[in-house]
Each structure stands twice: as structure tokens, then as C-alpha cells.
Image (cartoon, rainbow, N blue to C red):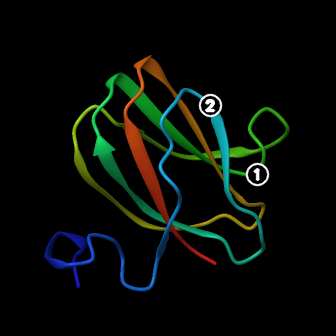
């Protein structure tokens, strides 16, 4: 079922991280079965971006996805396997609120 038609507003069975509301690096999930599944921008930021890494950013983590978070709504993604863990880096002029959808 496409995420747009899903009343849960996230991939079926995916968990949502607590809202990220500042410019920071956040550990979403650590484990060999971690899969990034998209995001929900709860509140739009201003020139605000989110980067998703497989592994710790700056310590060998691999950039898997980048998306703007300055429009409220769903950010669909194909499932991205992150066996080193899912980490989100948020940065920009004014932070909004974003939750990351993932499977573990």
C-alpha cells in the first residue's frame, strides 16, 4: 500500500522515532536489521535538511539519503538497509520537527 494512501501515515509495520526538533545528530536505531523507511515532517523548518546515515556520521558512516524538511508531510523512501545503524543529521536555518520511519 502506498504511504500516501495509508491511514497510519507511515509504511505498514514501521516505527516512528521521537520527533527531532533541533540541528543535531540523532541515533534512530542501532542493529544489524535496521532499515530506513521514510520520514514524516511534522512541522516545516526553514532551509532545513535531513541526512540519513548507515553508521555514525564522521566515523565511517555512509550517507544513504538527503531530503529537505521545509515542507510538512510525508517523505517516502524505498527501504534502505542500514546494518551499521540509522543516524539522522539535521541542519539548517530554522529547525522544524521530523520523525524517522524505520524497521528493526
Q: Nearer the viewer, mark 1 or mark 2?
A: 2
Specify the label residue 55 is tagged with.
Answer: 1
In this rendered view, identify the residue nearer to me: 91 or 35.
Answer: 91
Q: SS class of the residue under badge 1? A: loop
Position of the N terminus, as image quadrant, is bottom left
Q: Nearer the viewer, residue 96 or 91?
A: 96
Q: Locate residue 48: give its quadrant.
A: top left
**Mark toward the start of the polypeptide (1 vs 2):** 2
Crowding near pointer 1: few (<14 within 10 Å), some, many (20+)? many
Residue 24 is tagged as 2
Residue 29, compared with residue 23, is above or below; it is: below
Q: Estimate how packed mark 2 is, as few (under 14), some (14 to 19) or many (20 or more) residues with alpha carbons within 10 Å.
A: few
* Residue at the far top in the pictured view: 93
In the rendered image, the vertical position of residue 98 relative to residue 83, given as above or below: above
Residue 91, compared with residue 2, is above or below; it is above
Q: Position of residue 52 (x, y in %)?
A: 56, 47
Kindly state the secondary structure of the residue where label 2 is placed.
loop
**Residue 89 point in image, percent of width and height:** 59, 36
Q: Position of residue 72 (x, y in %)?
A: 22, 43
Q: Where the C terminus falls, by quadrant? A: bottom right
- Count of numbered badges drawn on the protein: 2
**Residue found at the very far left of the displayed protein:** 5
Residue 97 at x, y = what percent?
39, 40
Whole-Å distance between the Cαs marked 1 and 2? 15 Å
Q: Which residue shows up at 73% across the image and 60% down it?
A: 85
Residue at x 42% of width, y 26% of height? 95
Residue at 83% x, 41% y is 60
Amino acid at each position: 500500500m502506498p504511504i500516501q494512501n495509508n491511514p497510519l501515515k507511515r509504511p505498514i509495520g514501521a516505527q516512528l522515532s521521537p520527533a527531532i526538533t533541533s540541528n543535531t545528530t540523532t541515533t534512530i536505531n542501532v542493529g544489524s536489521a535496521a532499515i530506513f523507511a521514510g520520514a514524516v515532517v511534522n512541522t516545516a523548518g526553514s532551509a532545513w535538511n535531513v541526512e540519513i546515515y548507515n553508521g555514525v556520521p564522521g566515523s565511517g558512516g555512509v550517507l544513504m539519503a538527503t531530503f529537505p524538511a521545509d515542507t510538512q508531510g510525508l517523505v517516502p523512501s524505498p527501504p534502505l538497509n542500514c546494518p551499521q545503524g540509522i543516524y539522522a543529521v539535521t541542519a539548517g536555518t530554522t529547525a522544524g520537527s521530523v520523525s524517522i520511519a524505520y524497521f528493526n
